[in-house]
Amino acid sequence: MEYPPQFSEERGLALIADIVDWQINHGSLLKQIIPHSSTSSSSQCSPVGVSVFPTLFPRAQFDHARELQPIYNELYCAMAEDEQWIFEAIRDLLPVDPLAAALWGIHKEVKQVGYAQKISVGIFRSDYMLEGPEAEFPLRSGQTLNVALKQVEFNTFSCAGGTHANKTGAMHRYLARTSAYETGSDSTTPISLEALPRNDNITSLSGCLAAAHQAYGRQRNRAAADTAVLFVVQPNNFNIADERPLEYALWDQDVPAYRVDYPDDFLQYTTLTESRELLFHPPWLGSKCVEVSVAYMRAGYEAYEYDSIGQEARLRIELSLAIKCPSLLAHICTFKKVQCALTAPGALEHFLSPEKAAMIRSTFVSMYSFDDSDIGSRARHLATDQKLARNYILKPSLEGGGHNTFGEDIPDFLASIPESQWSAYILMERIRSPSVTNVLLSPSGLDSGGVVSELGVFGTCLWRKGTDDRPYDMLQNFVGGWSFKTKHEDVDEMSVVKGYGCFDTPLLF
Amino acid sequence: MEYPPQFSEERGLALIADIVDWQINHGSLLKQIIPHSSTSSSSQCSPVGVSVFPTLFPRAQFDHARELQPIYNELYCAMAEDEQWIFEAIRDLLPVDPLAAALWGIHKEVKQVGYAQKISVGIFRSDYMLEGPEAEFPLRSGQTLNVALKQVEFNTFSCAGGTHANKTGAMHRYLARTSAYETGSDSTTPISLEALPRNDNITSLSGCLAAAHQAYGRQRNRAAADTAVLFVVQPNNFNIADERPLEYALWDQDVPAYRVDYPDDFLQYTTLTESRELLFHPPWLGSKCVEVSVAYMRAGYEAYEYDSIGQEARLRIELSLAIKCPSLLAHICTFKKVQCALTAPGALEHFLSPEKAAMIRSTFVSMYSFDDSDIGSRARHLATDQKLARNYILKPSLEGGGHNTFGEDIPDFLASIPESQWSAYILMERIRSPSVTNVLLSPSGLDSGGVVSELGVFGTCLWRKGTDDRPYDMLQNFVGGWSFKTKHEDVDEMSVVKGYGCFDTPLLF
């Protein structure tokens, strides 16, 4: 099977026109932010990067990733209610990582007066790549597939891409449906609707926020006209096409949803009452005031956001009665250091049954902290040897990626920083994915060749803090939709909005 | 009542950000066409012009315009089946108007072999302005409204703006719902959901094409895999956000819909069989071939499109079994000359009952042809006098507007062309609308001040040619949604996509 099909230039242009038109009509776009300008004339936008064809991905691994998600949700809810365990996992980080230090400091401050809200909500995403030998993928007839699903990272905070993935999935299904991939009567295209999974991120993510909103109940404060979900966002966001549809979907379910820039506008336009309701009263609502039921965080994941203003803003959120998406401790669970701590013997069994722990562990690759243990020595040995380092990635404990050092660059990088800073990083085995062929359409043009993909599975959950006997009650535990990002195999980073890689749909086989 | 409400700069900026984000996320956009470029990098787009606030419009006149639409549909279907009447209306035009001559020529050629399809489908739009004295609008309490609904034009061909209007209506309703117009507790905003009518153009227009598709029945030709609606469009269209959603809506109803550029690609990628099925087999469908059930015309309304290639393409469409949206004679009914002929005494009664004729006539303003009659003398007198001409517009018989001459410019314009060409024009009384205040947001920025609006009502219908006794059978006759366009009162033209005016929503009172 030749994949993707070879198209004439004329046909390729028609396909690209179909793609671009679909993107323009469905908000599959990035906004171009021109500073100090606020009229429509400065509001240009352009299509987000997408693959021209869906990319081959084995159905068994796709299904397995979705099966794992409720267990991952359970694991992270349990972790988020285990302060002591988290502290052990990140204690080495606190002196060297300003984001970790800021968040832990806020946690301690809130703890002194006590958290006001027992319910938390999580929108998580677990990212995987396939690991397997080159030659076996895609399958030739009679060949056995020998690939495994390996976790790249687990995101608990500000998980992006849900809407773009939803729309890209719908786009590839539209193209398949309109015969845009038809190869002719003498051969059949493998791109059928049955092979392209549906994606319901907008429904599932907004549904989870709506459930949290219901769980909050009626407003307590008399000044408030209503309760509402508050999207806490970064200023001048060019990626509004990923966030806004969740607001629109909430309104469509009769759940009021507003947004505010973090941290300045948030501090200016909210008040924490003595009984710790969080009130929102920006000038653009006139004299209307709403009580925040759910604070949905799409900001506050970078260290620079925690100057004194940022700390004050986050403290106000955490002190409040609002249900946080996610809680502060669940936020900290997204650190690579925590991911690394889970690979320690017995760590998973602390939270999960042995059967579930084994399922989760099968997705792990080797990870190392630079600590004083034997593991730490091994990490130093691997990371400082040019040859050995080739098979590893050095990751800072930050959320969001984009700060990684790859393979042979690791020894020089580590040599350039004081050894006391090394504990801010973890060393992770590189996942070698079998390469397949595709054509990617990005703002810089068309690019065809070998590509690798990353599958993310969204999980949504709602849980209540429990007692020592039973540390938490799971109120909702759902698998959401998926995200599927594909990049040229020679590019290390994966970030579509930064121009590396494209949104994509798995073509299941 | 002060309208629109006065907002602080900060609040105005927040409102505009809400508008722009909504537009980007909902495809309320214009595509920027960069010639000779076909990748995503050249596919920028920007928001279409919209009003910041909905514009005041009286509910009685809005409702009345909708009541009139089924009668207008009936009138135009009846006209479209009365070849002799149409010929009388446009006979003076044929020697001087190349578009009229081309269309009539194609009609005569088809008539020689006979039309193959008895069913036609119409997507019509009747445009109105309010006529009334300045001071009475908007109403002060206790004041009586003295405004009348006057027709600007009736469009039978390539009616645009349906999708943009649908989306703009949804946008203003979203803004009202999210308290974006809230003025505070001490006064209430008139901008309520009850005052903002819903708009269902995408559903109603696509529904009408789907009904025509069903009426066509199964494919007759064995080579065809399926039947499909074919959108016949202009190349390099920047207004895809108005057309494409109708295609998507058809697919959502399981009606296949494809598009082809007119006339070159159309000629290249279609075949007319001996039994007059129209087959579509472009390279981008691989070896797939579909039989066209409905040819939906969004091209072919300008004279330049009827060179020999264009004539051949239109002839092929008209000769075919495909149901045309609209038929060739219904197309000709959109000429201003036909609109003018309807104002002659007894003309409406030729098609309608006296009651219906009276209702329709009440929306007419004076119109004059430059012919040999007393009417023609009157037209020459009015149009060549600088002072008298002030109250008139000179319109060529072209579809689409944009070629009009206004008021005092008319005498000089007429003096600049040979008098033999004057019969290509009609003279129409200017409609003086009461001005209201609003803020318009267009690609050139914000503009506040006095504005006037144009209300369009969409009508959809399906009819079958009858016999001499009963010239046609109405199979469907529906009111669609509406369009509402607003421009600065000092601007003569109304064309949003050309940058004059904005899409808007009537705020009914």
Image: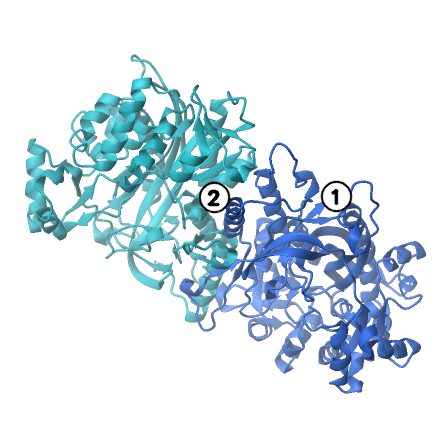
Chain colours: A blue, B cyan
Query: Residue drawn at (68%, 66%), measured in percent from left and top?
Result: A493
Q: CA distance from mark 1 to mark 2?
A: 31 Å
**Neighbour class for label 2 at 10 Å: few (<14), some, many (≥20)?**
many
Using the image, determine if residue A17 lies above or below residue B215: below
User: In the figure, is residue B50 to the left or right of A234?
Assistant: left
| Numbered label tally | 2
Residue occupied by mark 2 = B244
Using the image, determine if residue A388 lies above or below residue B262: below
Chain of the residue where label 1 is placed in the rendered structure: A
Q: Amino acid at mark 1?
A: Phe
| Image-quadrant location for residue B189 | bottom left
Secondary structure, mark 2, is helix
Q: Nearer the viewer, residue A358 or B71?
A: A358
How far across and how far down the image is residue A124, in percent?
73, 59
Secondary structure, mark 1, is loop
For the N terminus of chain B, the image quarter is bottom left
| Image-quadrant location for residue A352 | bottom right
Using the image, determine if residue B329 lies above or below residue B23: above
How far across and how far down the image is residue A90, in percent?
81, 76
User: In the figure, is residue A501 to the left or right of B113?
Assistant: right
User: In the figure, is residue B158 to the left or right of B249?
Assistant: left
In the picture, the disc for residue A509 is 1
Using the image, determine if residue A457 lies above or below residue A306: above
Chain of the residue where label 2 is placed in the rendered structure: B
Q: Nearer the viewer, residue A326 or A211?
A: A326
Q: Could you tell me if residue A110 is visible in this image?
A: no
Q: Could you tell me if residue B92 is visible in this image?
A: yes
Q: Nearer the viewer, residue B43 or A166?
A: B43
Query: Residue drawn at (40%, 63%), measured in percent from left and top?
Result: A41
